[in-house]
Structure formats: C-alpha cells, structure tokens
C-alpha cells in the first residue's frame, strides 16, 4: 500500500447540467473560447451553451473547426485564433477530439512553441509546460468513451512525421467536467459501441498496468468495467435509454480517472500509431487490438484477467482454475465487443501488408514506454503477430 493519486477535476454529472456552464465558467474568466465541431452547432448543443454563458454575462468566441483525431497544424491554427481573441477560459464541447483541441490550445495560447513540442514521446522528452500561464479548461463531453474530461491528456497527430502522441500535463486537467448524459443520446450506434469499448480498454489496461496500478485505480477500474458490462449493450441497442446512457457516461468519466492515475499499456501503444498511419478513429483502433493483446498476455497474468471475467454477471469461469477462467474472461470480453458491433478488421480499412512492420517499428520506438508497464514484455515480433491476427 504505497501509491500516489490525483483526482483534481470537479465533476458535474447529470441530465441538464450543460445549463450550468455559464455560472461555472464565470469562476475562471470573463471571455470564453468555445472549441467544438460543426455538428455540435447543427445539433443545437452550441446554442444551449451560448445561452448559459450569456446568462452569466460572459463574452464567447466560437471556434467550431475542431476535427476528429486532431492534427498538430490544425491545433496551431486554432491557438493563433485563441491568442487573437484574448479569451481567458477555454471550453471544449464535443467528443474527445474537441476536448483534446481545447486542452492543447490552452497550453499554446500562452507558450511560444508549436503544439508538437509539448507531446510526450517515448524517445523524446517534451518541452516544459508552465501551469501558471496555461488557460483553465472546462470539458463537456457529448460522447462516452475517451474520458478526456477527467484526464491530463491530449492526443495529437503529426501528419509530417506520421506519428500520434499524447500531451501529458497536469496543467490540462479540466477545472470542471460537465457530464450531461442527455447529450450522448444523439450519438450514432456505431460510435456508441466503439467509444464504449475505448472506455472499457482504459480501465482494463490500467488494471493490468504493473508499475502504476494501485488499490484506488483497481477499485475505479472495476467500477467502470462493471458499469460498461451492464449498460453499454443497452445504450447500443437503444440510444434513447437515458439510464443506459448515464451508466456509460459515468463509466467513461471514471475510466478517465483510472488512466489519469495508472495509464494504458500495449493496446493503446499499437492503436495510436495505427491512427496516425491509417486515419482510423482512436476508438476503432483500440477495439481492434484489445482481445489479441489479452490472449498474448494470459500466461503472464491469468489470475488478474480472470478477475475481470468475474465482473460479468453470468461468468462461466467461477470455480475454475485461473488459466481456464482467464480464457473464459477473454471470451466474455470478445462477446461484449461483438454485441456492440466491433467486428472490423484491418483489411476492411484498406491496410496493406507493409503496415505490420511499420506498426512494429512505431510501437518499439516512439510508443515504447507503455510496453514496459504490461505484465509481459512484447517484442517487435509479438507486435507483428498481434497486427497480423487482425488483418
């Protein structure tokens, strides 16, 4: 029992909470830079945010050009707009990508370097971030999966270097996360399934993270995985089931807390470079590799994988040996993925055979740090085997 934990985000959770944005933002500034995507405008979420901000007497500058899987050059352009606007608080409204852009520009607005300077790669340290000048952030997720609303992470793609990396800075923990399950009712079915599995993978990987897991992260991970097992299939089947949406949204935010304290491992180490090379969404990339990574991990940590299986109400592995129970746990996880539409393979995404070696190189160089945190060390050939298994 020797660990450190940090949970600094004020979580405002519940239906209709978006209407409290103005009073919450007023604590941190008078001029708001609202980062979102055009579809959030079309869905009416931006108007609702504006009404709340206006009621609080705040000026708002709208930036609705955030893009999925944000690119470094796009973030640098957004940061230039933020500097011109003279705003003093940043709000991210949308999926994980919009929140990631909000976090990144909150750094760049007052720092001199381009955003890629602050990305933490395994083979290159980032430039330091001054927390005292980083703008305060409020996150309002409209999807339920990335957990970006409760993490100090912002994921960025560099199209010049064909790399995807993460800013890891306590300064970009949102001051407030407004998690309103009503907003996620508009999520398409496919996105519901993929983002939910991303949240599941966050907790699962943190649960397996040998050096960084703790009694707190384990408890949070089990809470989040249990909630997703219970609620994600229902949210996938009926997007208007508000109880299911709330359960998945809660799990996603808790999974963000988990990775903020323990971190991900091999699945994410492969998924991020895949996104850089094929342009696949982060959630789809994570979903592809979750099961094959677990199968390779089983001999090294059967007991802990079996414990994940015990979170399933109808788990068939109870009373069996750790090895058999772990195999049945992985089967149960695979069934969960299939139940929410996760059946894509790399060949469906237009991947060529060269991707096998490219990902092995990426993972063992600039994304190598997470490999050392997993129960078993993956070699370059192990990575190749994993990638081939989902071609």
Image (tube, rainbow, N blue to C red):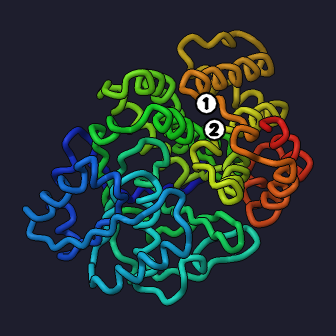
Figure quadrant of residue 10: bottom left
Observer-nearest residue: 260 or 268? 268
Give the structural element (helix, strand or loop) at label 1: loop
Give the structural element (helix, strand or loop) at label 2: helix
Residue at numbered disc 1: 342
Asked if residue 214 is positioned above or below residue 92 in the image, the reply reads above
- Residue 106 place in picture, x, y as percent: 40, 74
Neighbours of disc 1 within 10 Å: few (<14), some (14-19), many (20+): some
Observer-nearest residue: 222 or 60? 60
> Image point 78% across, 36% down: which residue?
390
Residue at numbered disc 2: 287
Question: Which residue is at the far right?
Answer: 381
Observer-nearest residue: 104 or 378? 104
- Residue 179 place in picture, x, y as percent: 31, 46
Q: Is residue 302 left or right of residue 109?
A: right
Q: Is residue 228 left or right of residue 178?
A: right
- Quadrant containing the C terminus in the rendered view: top right
> Image point 61% across, 13% down: which residue?
315
> Which numbered disc covers residue 175?
none
Q: Is residue 333 visible?
A: yes
Decide: marks 2, 1 in contact (CB < 8 A)? yes
Q: Is residue 378 visible?
A: no
Asked if residue 339 is positioned above or below residue 193 in the image, the reply reads above
Figure quadrant of residue 318: top right
């Amino acid at each position: 029992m020797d660990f450190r934990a940090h949970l600094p985000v004020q979580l405002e959770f519940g239906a209709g909470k978006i209407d409290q944005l103005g009073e919450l933002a007023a604590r941190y500034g008078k001029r708001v830079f609202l980062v979102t995507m055009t579809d959030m405008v079309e869905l009416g979420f931006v108007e609702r945010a504006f009404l709340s901000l206006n009621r609080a007497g705040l000026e708002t500058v709208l930036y609705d050009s955030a893009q999925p899987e944000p690119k470094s050059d796009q973030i640098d352009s957004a940061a230039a707009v933020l500097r011109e606007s003279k705003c003093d608080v940043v709000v991210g409204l949308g999926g994980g990508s919009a929140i990631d852009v909000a976090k990144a520009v909150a750094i760049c607005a007052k720092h001199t370097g381009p955003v890629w300077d602050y990305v933490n790669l395994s083979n290159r340290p980032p430039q330091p971030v001054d927390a005292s000048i980083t703008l305060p952030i409020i996150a309002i997720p409209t999807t339920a999966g990335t957990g970006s609303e409760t993490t100090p992470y912002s994921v960025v793609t560099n199209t010049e270097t064909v790399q995807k990396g993460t800013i890891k800075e306590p300064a970009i923990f949102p001051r407030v996360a407004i998690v309103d399950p009503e907003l996620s009712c508009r999520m398409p079915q496919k996105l519901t399934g993929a983002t939910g599995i991303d949240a599941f993978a966050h907790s699962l990987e943190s649960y397996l993270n040998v050096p960084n897991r703790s009694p707190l992260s384990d408890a949070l991970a089990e809470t989040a995985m249990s909630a997703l097992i219970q609620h994600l299939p229902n949210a996938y089947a009926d997007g208007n089931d508000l109880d299911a949406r709330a359960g998945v949204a809660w799990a996603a935010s808790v999974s963000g807390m988990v990775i903020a304290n323990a971190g991900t491992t091999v699945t994410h180490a492969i998924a991020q470079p895949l996104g850089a090379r094929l342009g696949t969404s982060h959630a789809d990339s994570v979903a592809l590799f979750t099961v094959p990574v677990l199968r390779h991990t089983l001999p090294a940590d059967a007991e802990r994988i079996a414990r994940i299986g015990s979170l399933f109400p109808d788990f068939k592995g109870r009373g069996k040996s750790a090895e058999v129970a772990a195999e049945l746990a992985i089967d149960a996880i695979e069934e969960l993925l299939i139940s929410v539409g996760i059946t894509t393979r790399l060949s469906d995404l237009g991947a060529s055979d060269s991707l096998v070696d490219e990902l092995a190189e990426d993972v063992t160089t600039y994304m190598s740090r997470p490999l050392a945190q997993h129960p078993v060390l993956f070699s370059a050939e192990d990575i190749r085997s994993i990638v081939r298994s989902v071609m």
